[in-house]
Amino acid sequence: MNNEENSFNIRVPCRHLRSKEMFHQDLGQEDDEFSSGLFWCGQTHESFGPDGQPVGKKECCAGRSCHIS
């Protein structure tokens, strides 16, 4: 087995991404059936980031101009 087979594609979310679940779930824990799925940006306090784009687990990752890891 080589290292490529063992590596994972980990997407690190922006440190400003917020959700209700982050206050009661452990880091890396899967969302449960009661997850709200609602996110907001800690910089704008809205459902969009400083770049005007929507926020979310998949959206707030490296490649955006406002992303901070």
Image (cartoon, helix red, strand yellow):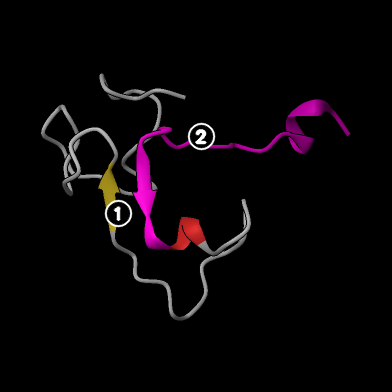
Neighbour class for label 1 at 10 Å: few (<14), some, many (≥20)? some
Per the model, the C-alpha gap separating discs 1 and 2 is 15 Å
The outermost residue toward the top is 65
**Residue nearer the viewer, 10 or 60:** 60
Within the magenta stretch, is there residue 7? yes
**Quadrant of the rendered structure where residue 36 is?**
bottom left
Q: Residue at x 40, y 33 (%)?
A: 14
Would you say 23 lies left or right of 57 here?
right
Residue 66 position (above or below residue 45): above
Highlighted range, magenta: 1-20
At label 1, the amino acid type is: Phe
Q: Residue at x 10, y 33 (%)?
A: 52
Quickly name the residue at label 2.
12
**Quadrant of the rendered structure where residue 43 is?**
top left
SS at mark 1 in the image: strand
SS at mark 2 in the image: loop
The outermost residue toward the bottom is 33
**Residue nearer the viewer, 51 or 10:** 51
Neighbour class for label 2 at 10 Å: few (<14), some, many (≥20)? some
Quickly name the residue at label 1.
39
Would you say 18 lies left or right of 53 here?
right
At label 2, the amino acid type is: Val
